[in-house]
Image (cartoon, grey):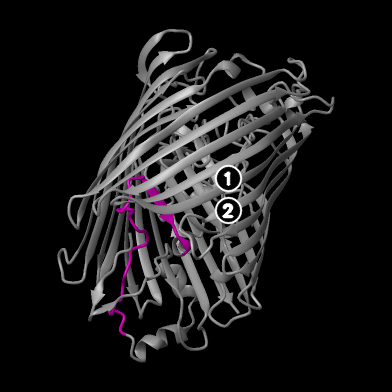
């Protein structure tokens, strides 16, 4: 919810809040920039309307939205690095795009093995990623972060029923940039160029954006980005083997409005990462002789053609029809194959084609207001992992996943204070084997699920609200399971969430605001076959619980953001029938992050200082000295940054950002990651829109 400060009776505008460093910026700013302050702008004068991140105090969903200003300020090298400041969201090996995974509330990526398991949905412009378990090579985060203008992370199942029946861990929704984001009133075209550099890894960045709108009907955006990063070093100066990469990204997006009621949109996005003579295992720099080395080419494509129809004389029709396509391709060619295994030569290709129709209706039933969203999707996902022998590798079976899904979400304003939102999803799938050595072609397995939930949000008064959610998920078998016994197993999860939020103004002074939200949750997983306990057994029954806190305080003199997460889990049953009460190895370390910032020079200069503390985590049964699930030590990271965007003079229109991450060059390893984190890193970016 937007925080509004009242200053001299006027609404104060939104400020830019960027993680950037004062020291580095001082080195790059011309003297003219500071001369402006001597011409009448006092450094202690502050106009501030928001902190770096809003707290979603007006919804029951535990969601966090990272907007364009924060995305710019974060200066992230990888898509995953944009997510690790969200409570109970942990990035696993996220300092590279390939192999990077994300865990939400202990679910999602399996450390050191797979990048996704169906419990976390990754959605790009409404299109769900579909490449699932690819052994030590998979990634659903191999995307250029500069492509996006907004990312919303929903912890738990609340946001996932539109996309998946199994996303009990959470949903990540990323939205790409539009031409209108760069065109001001009256502009027909704009060009934006951005250049960046990082010292740790000697990383270079260039992005170019062309926006064009000759009239109010047609709009076009073209994006090209290139990133070149060498191997990084940890806090002790040791090489982080396997962290080098080159990445190119392109986006073409066109829209044409037929009339005020109808609009066509076409979007094509592609990311490529070519690698030569690199480790097969993207998660860790292990001894080459164990897994070997490969040439690897990663190609991720997202495309859709959309027709939107919203008649101005009807509240019952707001229709969208979409033809969607997702292609996730990992080509492997062995360079050093010590065991002569097919694993190093399999070309993994997942292609998903679907047709989706959604409609939003707004209507009343008595005194209650409804916003009903209904969607129907039919599609097929084709998967192969062809080796040189022309068959699918046994570790990555192939075939076809045909599915039909129907969902509805009804946001009901029962009263001015009470909102109830039920969700329902039906999904039917049929998995069919193709070109697998261990299973005859045409062998099929079918399954269906009914999932859903309901959440309630109640305003006790103008400042305090309470909320709760009950949800049920079913994580149906993946194509990866088609050749094993898990193809007959559907994982089930039940989630309860309760919480309260607060938003108020004039708390300590006449011009400040405070917003906060706390959520407690409990998730019970039953019939699980996803999380290995070793020795061929799985955690069949798991109980998860935890807490999430987000808060923001805005004062005319400064702003403060706080985020914290606690995540716990116990294994209650094992797939062989054994009862257990051991720690669930995949829950992540507790974390708290604090950001303090201040804006100067009539919103031109923004300084922010962040403290990120991860607590030690010994809640694991793993004793291996090399496992990513081994116990981790506590550590604290300090970041500082500055953003300077002059609004007058010769530098008007330029954007300078600089930062120092891990100021003290701390050597650390995040729980669940195979490798250490990056050491001290100076970052600098310069951008201008023409």
In the rendering, at what x and y percent does residue 578 appear?
42, 8
Is 43 inside the magenta-drawn segment?
Answer: yes
Q: Find residue 567 and report its horizontal and vertical position in percent.
A: 34, 34
Total marks placed: 2
Q: Magenta part of the protein: which range?
A: 42-68
Q: 105 or 405, which is in the foreground? A: 405
The quadrant of the image that shows the C terminus is bottom right
Considering the numbered disc 1 on the image, is that residue within a helix, a strand or a loop?
loop
Relative horizontal placement of residue 19, taking residue 488 as reference (left or right): left
The first of marks 1 and 2 along the sequence is 1
Is residue 467 visible to the viewer in this orientation of the structure? yes
| Residue under the image location 35 percent in, 37 percent down | 454
- Does 215 appear in magenta? no
* Labels 1 & 2 near each other (Cβ < 8 A): no
* Relative vertical location of residue 446 with respect to residue 14 in this rendering, above or below: above
**Residue at the spot of label 2:** 320
In the rendered image, residue 491, in percent from the top left (x then y), is placed at: 49, 23
Determine which residue is flagged by label 1: 141
Q: Can you tell which quarter of the image residue 189 is in? A: bottom right
């Amino acid at each position: 919810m937007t925080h509004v400060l009242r200053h001299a009776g006027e609404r104060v505008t939104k400020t830019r809040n960027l993680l950037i460093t004062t020291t580095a910026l001082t080195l790059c700013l011309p003297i003219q920039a500071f001369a402006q302050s001597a011409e009448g702008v006092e450094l202690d004068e502050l106009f501030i309307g928001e902190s770096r991140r809003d707290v979603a105090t007006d919804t029951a969903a535990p969601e966090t939205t990272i907007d364009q200003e924060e995305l710019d300020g974060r200066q992230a090298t990888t898509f995953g690095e944009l997510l690790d400041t969200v409570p109970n969201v942990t990035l696993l090996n996220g300092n590279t795009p390939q192999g990077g995974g994300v865990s939400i509330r202990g679910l999602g990526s399996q450390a050191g093995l797979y990048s996704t398991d169906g419990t976390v949905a990754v959605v790009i412009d409404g299109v769900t990623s579909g490449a699932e378990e690819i052994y030590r090579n998979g990634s659903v985060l191999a995307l250029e972060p500069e492509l996006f203008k907004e990312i919303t992370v929903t912890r738990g199942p609340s946001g996932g029923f539109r996309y998946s029946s199994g996303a009990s861990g959470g949903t990540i929704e990323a939205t790409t940039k539009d031409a209108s984001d760069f065109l001001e009133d009256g502009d027909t075209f704009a060009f934006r160029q951005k250049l960046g550099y990082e010292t740790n890894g000697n990383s270079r960045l260039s992005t170019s954006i062309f926006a064009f709108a000759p009239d109010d009907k047609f709009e076009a955006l073209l994006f090209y980005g290139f990133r070149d990063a060498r191997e990084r070093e940890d806090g002790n100066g040791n090489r982080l083997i396997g962290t080098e990469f080159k990445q190119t990204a392109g986006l073409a997006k066109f829209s044409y409005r037929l009339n005020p009621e109808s609009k066509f949109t076409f979007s094509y996005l592609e990311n490529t990462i070519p690698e030569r003579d690199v480790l097969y295992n993207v998660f860790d720099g292990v001894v080459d002789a164990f897994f070997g080395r490969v040439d690897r080419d990663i190609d991720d494509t997202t495309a859709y053609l959309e027709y939107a129809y919203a008649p101005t004389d009807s509240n019952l029709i707001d229709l969208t029809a979409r033809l969607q396509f997702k292609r996730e391709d990992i080509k492997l060619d062995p360079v050093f194959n010590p065991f002569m295994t097919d694993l190093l030569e399999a070309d993994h290709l997942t292609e998903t084609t679907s047709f989706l129709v959604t409609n939003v209706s707004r209507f009343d039933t008595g005194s209650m207001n409804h916003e009903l969203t209904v969607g129907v999707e039919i599609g097929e996902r084709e998967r192969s992992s062809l080796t040189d022998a022309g068959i699918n590798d046994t570790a990555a079976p192939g075939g076809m996943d045909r599915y039909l899904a129907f969902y509805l979400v009804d946001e009901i304003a029962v009263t001015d204070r009470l909102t109830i939102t039920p969700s329902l999803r039906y999904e039917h799938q049929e998995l069919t084997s193709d070109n697998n050595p261990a299973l005859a072609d045409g062998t099929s397995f079918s399954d269906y699920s009914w999932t859903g939930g309901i959440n309630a949000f109640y305003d006790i008064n103008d400042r305090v609200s309470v909320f709760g959610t009950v949800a049920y998920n079913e994580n149906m078998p993946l194509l990866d399971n088609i050749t094993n016994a898990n193809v007959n197993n559907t994982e089930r999860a039940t989630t309860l969430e309760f919480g309260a939020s607060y938003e108020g103004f004039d708390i300590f002074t006449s011009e400040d605001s405070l917003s906060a939200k706390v959520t407690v949750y409990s998730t019970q997983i039953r019939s699980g076959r996803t999380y290995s306990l070793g020795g061929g057994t799985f955690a069949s029954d798991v109980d998860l619980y935890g807490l999430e806190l987000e808060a923001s305080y805005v004062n005319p003199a400064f702003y403060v953001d706080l985020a914290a997460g606690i995540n716990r889990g116990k294994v209650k049953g094992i797939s062989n029938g054994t009862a257990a009460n051991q720690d669930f190895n995949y829950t992540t370390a507790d974390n708290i992050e604090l950001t303090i910032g201040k804006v100067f020079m009539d919103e031109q200069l923004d300084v922010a200082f962040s403290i990120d503390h991860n607590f030690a985590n010994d809640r694991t049964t793993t004793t291996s000295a090399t496992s990513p699930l081994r116990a981790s030590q506590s550590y604290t990271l300090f970041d500082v940054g500055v953003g300077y965007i002059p609004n007058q003079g010769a530098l008007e229109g330029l954007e300078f950002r600089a930062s120092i991450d891990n100021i003290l060059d701390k050597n650390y390893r995040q729980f669940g990651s195979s490798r250490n984190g990056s050491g001290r890193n100076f970052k600098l970016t310069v951008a201008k829109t023409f």
